[in-house]
Amino acid sequence: QVQLVESGGGLVQPGGSLRLACVASGNIFSINFMGWYRQAPGKERELVARITDGGTTNYADSVKGRFNISRDNAKSTMLLQMNSLKPEDTAVYYCNGRIYTTRYTSFELWGQGTLVTVSS
């Protein structure tokens, strides 16, 4: 069974930093794109940042210059370094990825989410 497991969420004061991690495990041949999404109370889920297996990244305008996404393909791990956090960054953060279990078989997978709360 393939799964994505997030960690690193918590409570932080405005201006602080957190690092989220997402680890993929199970029968994995390769992982194409991986990304972080977030959903704040009463709002739709939105893309935060995304990274391809080649390292190409893109970010939501709201987090550019503050967040940095990275991945370690050998360890099937993706990180999100979040700096200068603002109260509006408060949300449940979800890991997402396109998982290949064989060269030709793939599916999109979501993690269970980790809560980030930015508050004084």
Image (spheres, helix red, strand yellow):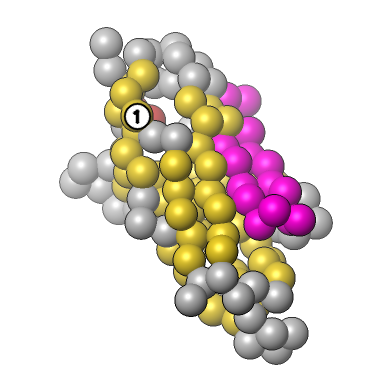
* Looking at the image, residue 52 lies above or below residue 81: below
* Looking at the image, residue 100 lies above or below residue 118: below
On whether residue 115 falls in the magenta region, the answer is: no
* Looking at the image, residue 100 lies above or below residue 60: below
Q: Residue at x 36, y 56 (%)?
A: 112
Mark 1 Cα shell of 10 Å, populated few (<14), some (14-19), many (≥20): some
- Tag 1: amino acid: Gly
Q: Residue at x 36, y 50 (%)?
A: 113
Q: Position of residue 67 (x, y in %)?
A: 57, 30
Q: Is residue 80 visible?
A: yes
Residue 104 left/right relative to 80: right
Q: Residue at x 61, y 48 (%)?
A: 78
Give the number of marks: 1
On whether residue 79 falls in the magenta region, the answer is: yes
The residue beneath circle 1 is: 10
Looking at the rendering, the stretch of residues picked out in magenta corresponds to 65-80
Q: Position of residue 81 (x, y in %)?
A: 57, 31
Q: Residue at x 63, y 51 (%)?
A: 77
- Residue furthest left in the image: 42
Residue 92 left/right relative to 58: left
Q: Is residue 46 visible?
A: no
